[in-house]
Image (tube, rainbow, N blue to C red):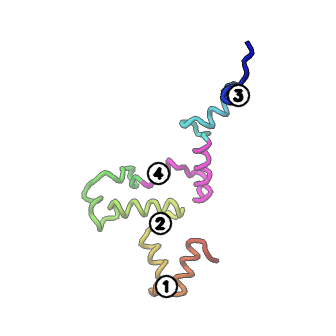
Amino acid sequence: MNARLTGTGVLALAGVVGGVLLLVALRRKAGAVADAINPASADNLAYAGVNRAGASISGNPAWTLGGALFDWTHDAQGRPLWTLDAARLDPASADNLAYAGVNRAGASISGNPAWTLGGWLFDATHDQAGQLVVPGGQWFSDELRRIFGNGK
């Protein structure tokens, strides 16, 4: 019997050969490849890449995404921010959900543990003497460019 491979047969054969070659390569480099794609490994490509980028951006060589997420979602005592109590719901409390969440995230991103949204807003809208600068004025535009990197 003379059987000829058609387009579908060629594709199937190429898939089988490619799969076998991939298995051989994986067996040869099983440790490195397994760690690179293992979601539980600290050598996982995504985990290592995100953590290196975060460390570079934050300036903290020990920065990890997991640590940042924990910091952003827990208070200084390690309690989850979604734990509701009187202080978490009191708008005047430094433990209130919005205040604590925004300021902890801002502190982590900026690398300044004392960063607050209120402080940033004051700095962005006042000059060095503490005088309010009208939004849209030249100083305000220059400051926004400086903060967001669109100017020198």
Q: In the displayed image of the protein, which residue is found farthest to the front?
A: 1
Instruction: Residue at 27%, 63% (x, y): give it.
Output: 90
Q: Amino acid at mark 1?
A: Gly
Q: Amino acid at mark 3?
A: Val
Q: CA distance from mark 1 to mark 3?
A: 66 Å
Residue 63 magenta? yes
Q: Which quadrant of the rendered structure holds the N terminus?
A: top right
Foreground mark, 3 or 4? 3
The residue labelled by disc 3 is 10
- Circles 1 and 4: CB distance less than 8 Å? no
Residue 144 in the image: state x and y as whole percent: 54, 77
Q: Which residues are magenta?
A: 45-72
Residue 141 magenta? no
Tell me, yes or no, if residue 23 can be seen here.
no
Q: In the displayed image of the protein, which residue is found farthest to the left?
A: 86
Crowdedness near tag 4: few (<14), some (14–19) or many (≥20) residues, C-alpha within 10 Å: few
The residue labelled by disc 2 is 114
Who comes first in sequence, dot 1 or dot 3?
Answer: 3
For label 4, the SS is helix
Q: Nearer the viewer, residue 125 or 36?
A: 36
The residue labelled by disc 1 is 136
